Each structure stands twice: as C-alpha cells, then as structure tokens.
Image (spheres, rainbow, N blue to C red):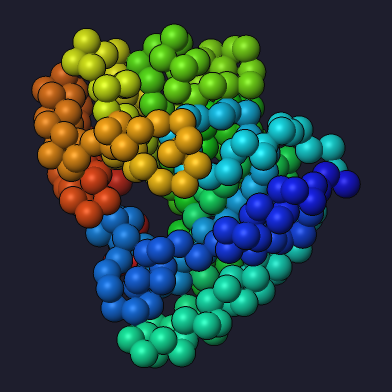
Amino acid sequence: MVSFDDETRKEFEKKSYGIVGNHSAVQICSWNKKALRNKGFCYKNRFYGVDTHRCVQMSPSAAWCQQNCIFCWRPMEFMRNIKMKEWDPPQEIIQKTVEQRKRLLSGLGGAHDANRELFKQAFERFPSHWAISLSGEPTLYPALPELVSLLNSNPEVKSTFIVTNGQEPEMFLKLKENNSLPTQLYLSLDAPNKALFQKINVPVYPDGWERLMKTISLFPSLPTRKILRFTLIKDLNDADEHLPSYAEIFERSETDFIEVKAYMFLGYSRKRLKKENMPSHEHIVEFSKKLEKLLPSYHIVDEEPISRIVLLERKEPRIPRRIPAYD
C-alpha cells in the first residue's frame, strides 16, 4: 500500500495537518478559522460565494506531486513519489477527512470571539465546500473520479473545487467521461514559455510543459466552471515582454475566469525565494490592467486587496460568477 513515510508524516503533523489514511490529509486554513471568529471570509466567498466556515481543504495525495514549484509554501521537499499502485477507497477518505476535520476544529468552539452559530454549522454538518487542493497533486490519485462523484452526489455538498498543475491530462478526460468533473476546476499556469516553466515549476516529467499545454487544449471541452490561476512572482515571471504569451494562452484556454494572484512569502517558499519577490496588491492590479488590454475576451471584474488577487471574467460570461447553489 502506498503510504506516508515516517519522516513525511511527522512533518505534516508538526504543521497541524490531519493525516487521513495512508496518503491523504486535511488542514484548517486560516480563513476558515477567521470566519468562525467573525474576522472575515476568504476571496472565494467574495468572488464565488462559497461557505468559508463550512469548507474542508484536503488532498487525496498529500505527499505526491510531479512538480517542485519554487513558490510553493507546502513542504514539497518531502514529495518523492508520483505514482500510486494501491490506494485508499474514496468513501473511506471522505469519512476520515470529516472525522479529522472535526478533531482539528474542536478547540475553536471555545474561543471567546467564536461565532457559536457558524461553529455549530461547521462542526455538526457535513462540509458544504470541498477544496481538493491542500498539498500534493490530486490528479495523481487514481480514484479521483469516484471521489468527486461521491461528493457531488451528497446533498450537503454545494461545491467541489480541484486545483491542479495540469500534468495529468488523461485524468481530465476520465473526469469528463465519468461525469465527475468538480463544480470548479482550477489550473495553475505560472510561466509564459517552457524555459520559465522549467525554472519556476521544476517538473519531474521531462515533457512537463507539453503536458500542461495538452491540458490547456482540453480546457474548452470540459463542461464545468474553469479558472486559470496565475501566481505572479515579482522580478521572475512578471516582465512586460511575457504579456503577449500569457494572453495567447489564456485566450486559447477559453477559461471562464482568470485569477492573477500574488506570490506570498510563506512557509517553505522562504527557502527558495526572497521577500522582495512578493508583489504588492498595487503591482498585481497594474499587471492585470496591462494583461486586460491584450485580452479581447476578458475584463477585470473584482479584486481582493487582502489576498492580493485580481479576478478577470469573460466579457460575455457563459456562467454566473457566483455558484448557483450558493445564491
């Protein structure tokens, strides 16, 4: 059975991850905690309407990834494997994820500033939003279609998000064929060409850029809400000369939304980058406006200064920005 080694398990537990079975994990994000203490909601609530307080952030392949992105604040130094020959069943992962989430949430209910009603909903009810994006690459979990199908069929679940690096294009075809695409599919794209991709994303596969471009070519055919997420790293991937290449890829993807998001000087990324590489929100806005001028199909519609992120949407949207289940 594929499983965490002792070193990796200890490292995850030290950073307050809840270990789920042999290869999955869950963690309570800072915005989840803030929402339960009346201190604000994450940008996904502002942009798309998700329930921050009833969100579960998890991964079915927490220590497995085909990239070693230099901006990743997760402990990717411990990710040595990219293949799963045996794996835990989806139903077991879901059940144990909920159990571990409750364990991690339990102490928050006693905080002096806790919102008792929101905490009751978060603790007692099944999570309404599943962010399959915690650590590692979710598309490496072979039973991902079954996992998403189980979540999508649960009446308590309003939305499922998958965040992917696009290195396994065949998995998206499987998700489509099994009618198990998530409510919203995020694809990370952080470089305008192969040379910068190799430097920033440090792929394990020698054809990593080609795999990503294949996923881009599949994007228009995937019948779900789609987002391209671009992490901007100051003085590394934000040069004006790259803008036309970004614009061409974004347009070709026919994505519904584009998020231009700042690299944040956090966690393990501090070993690889400098604080000066973290752009201000003003820099994100300036870059987004330059990009907007080169995108005939998209325009800026919102921003969240606290998270240093700007949202672009299709000028002729095919879907509502807020997920219908939350309206």
Query: How many marks overall?
Result: 0
Relative placement, left or right, of 51 versus 245 is: right
Q: Quadrant of residue 250?
A: top left
Identity of the residue furthest to the right in this view: 1
Relative placement, left or right, of 93 versus 318 is: right
Where in the figure is residue 231, as x and y percent of width and height? 35, 34
Closer to us: 7 or 319: 7
Where in the figure is residue 46, as x and y percent of width and height? 25, 59
Vertical arrangement, residue 102 with respect to residue 304, above or below: below
Closer to us: 75 or 271: 271
The residue depicted at 19 percent of the width and 40 percent of the height is: 280
Is residue 205 among the parts visible in the rendering? Answer: yes
Closer to us: 46 or 74: 74
Closer to us: 75 or 221: 75
Relative placement, left or right, of 46 versus 221 is: left
Q: Quadrant of residue 34?
A: bottom left
Is residue 252 among the parts visible in the rendering? Answer: no
Q: Quadrant of residue 228?
A: top left
Where in the figure is residue 165, as x and y percent of width and height? 51, 32
Which image quarter holds the C terminus?
bottom left
The residue depicted at 17 percent of the width and 47 percent of the height is: 302
Where in the figure is residue 291, as x and y percent of width and height? 18, 24
The residue depicted at 18 percent of the width and 42 percent of the height is: 281
The residue depicted at 57 percent of the width and 73 percent of the height is: 104
Vertical arrangement, residue 213 with respect to residue 181, above or below: above
